[in-house]
Image: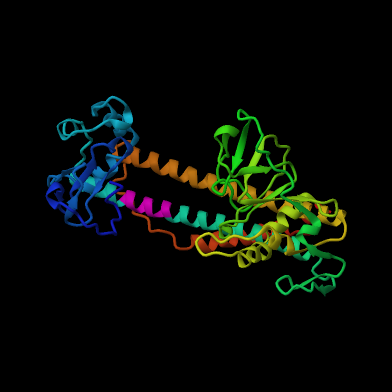
């Protein structure tokens, strides 16, 4: 039972008499959510919600074995067949129906062997998934570091630096320019007029839509007549939008493609680059740690910190003095990003495959399709995480190879 597994919180009950008593080792399932696999073992003696049915296993039944069995896809099909309701998501599995459902019941000693085997495999699968997710995070951090370094220091680590004259920026390559943001970008120049036709449809970007350099979710479509009053910033290809409210969320997004009927909230600043700076370079520069952290520092307010447009426009940015060098940096970043994205996608696919494998294995083992009698229980491999972090390092070496970087020249 997902609600009872790994129980760590104590709840205050207004009327304990309405709750059901469950002893440690009892099996409990949610009558309304059994079709979702809401079944498990009581980890301690206690009370459970009236929505649950509590069953005490007989001596010849291992609650752990049946907890595995009751979550298998084949058993979920039986749950559907024995449940009652008008639609599936409102079906209920009553005790009188549940107890009639046929179950595979191997001898108790074999049930225990199955549980030991599946516990071991589960532990290995969880460790593998944990390590792969950590690898994904390391790769994403590595990508952000590469972008930060490239757009704030360039590609030549031996280049002579000069003082930027701005404390939080520090030294910059000697041939780079530095200027307030308002000198390299127009800010909030296109506004949807109040006279717009009420039937005008558009995609609306608010703070919940945008993360750092990505969309968290697909923007919602509105008609102007029923749209939020803050829907006013008209967007186009090459713009970068930056949240000026709740700036700690670091909501920044560069619009790389041709777009039509995209409107952002006035909670964003819309930045349209001038000819001296490449649109995508500006977009990545605004996403860099230095700049976005400065935006946060310059924001005013506690619950909803915000930065004024005039203050945002006064923040300085440093950039190469030629579009050609900016484009070279962008090609370099593109090479890195594609390689890292490929590695991330590979790791995420491995996670999905392990989940699918484990689900199928559980089903096969508890129904007797795979015989695990006499199989040695494997220990969880503790060496996986160092191996995976080494994998991230090896990827760096491959990408940083002189031949690979030459493709970005």
Q: In which quarter of the image is the C terminus?
A: bottom right
Type of colouring: rainbow
Residue under the point 82% across and 55% down: 326
- The front one of 199 and 214 is 199
Asked whether residue 406 is in view, the answer is: no
Q: Residue 271 in the image: state x and y as whole percent.
A: 72, 51
Q: Is the residue 66 above or below the residue 23 in the image?
A: above
- The stretch of residues the image draws in magenta is 117-126
Q: Position of residue 78 (x, y in %)?
A: 27, 29
Left or right of 311? Residue 348 is: left
Dominant secondary structure, magenta: helix
Q: In this view, does 387 lie above or below 338?
A: below
Indicate yes or no whether the magenta region holds residue 174: no
Q: Is residue 119 magenta?
A: yes
Q: Residue furthest front?
A: 195
Quarter assignment of residue 10: bottom left
């Amino acid at each position: 039972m997902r609600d009872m597994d790994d129980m760590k919180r104590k709840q205050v009950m207004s009327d304990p008499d309405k709750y059901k008593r469950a002893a440690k080792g009892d099996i409990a399932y949610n009558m309304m959510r059994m079709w979702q696999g809401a079944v498990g073992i009581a980890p301690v003696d206690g009370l459970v919600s009236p929505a649950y049915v509590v069953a005490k296993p007989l001596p010849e039944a291992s609650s752990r074995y049946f907890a595995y069995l009751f979550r298998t896809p084949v058993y979920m099909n039986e749950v559907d067949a024995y449940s009652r309701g008008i639609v599936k998501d409102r079906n209920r599995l009553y005790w009188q129906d549940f107890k009639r459902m046929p179950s595979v019941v191997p001898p108790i000693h074999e049930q225990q062997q199955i549980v030991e085997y599946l516990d071991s495999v589960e532990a290995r699968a969880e460790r593998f998934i944990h390590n792969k997710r950590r690898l994904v995070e390391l790769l994403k951090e590595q990508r952000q570091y590469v972008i930060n370094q490239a757009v704030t220091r360039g590609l030549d680590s031996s280049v002579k630096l000069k003082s930027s004259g701005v404390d939080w920026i520090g030294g910059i390559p000697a041939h780079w320019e530095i200027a307030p943001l308002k000198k390299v970008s127009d800010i909030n120049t296109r506004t949807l007029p109040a006279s717009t036709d009420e039937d005008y449809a558009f995609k609306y970007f608010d703070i919940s839509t945008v993360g750092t350099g990505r969309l968290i979710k697909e923007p919602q479509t509105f008609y102007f007549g029923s749209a939020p009053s803050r829907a006013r910033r008209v967007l186009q290809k090459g713009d970068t939008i930056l949240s000026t409210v709740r700036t700690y969320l670091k909501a920044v997004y560069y619009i790389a493609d041709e777009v039509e009927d995209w409107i952002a909230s006035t909670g964003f600043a819309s930045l349209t680059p001038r000819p001296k700076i490449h649109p995508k370079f500006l977009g990545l520069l605004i996403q860099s740690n230095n700049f976005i952290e400065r935006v946060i520092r310059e924001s005013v307010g506690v619950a909803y910190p915000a930065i004024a447009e005039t203050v945002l426009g006064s923040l300085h940015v440093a950039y190469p003095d030629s579009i050609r060098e900016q484009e070279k940096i962008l090609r370099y970043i593109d090479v890195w990003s594609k390689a890292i994205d490929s590695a991330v996608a590979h790791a995420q696919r491995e996670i999905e495959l392990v989940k699918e494998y484990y689900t199928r294995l559980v089903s096969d083992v508890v129904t007797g399709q795979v015989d695990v009698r006499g199989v040695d229980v494997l220990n969880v491999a503790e060496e996986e995480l160092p191996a995976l972090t080494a994998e991230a390092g090896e990827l760096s070496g491959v990408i940083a190879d002189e031949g690979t970087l030459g493709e970005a020249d």
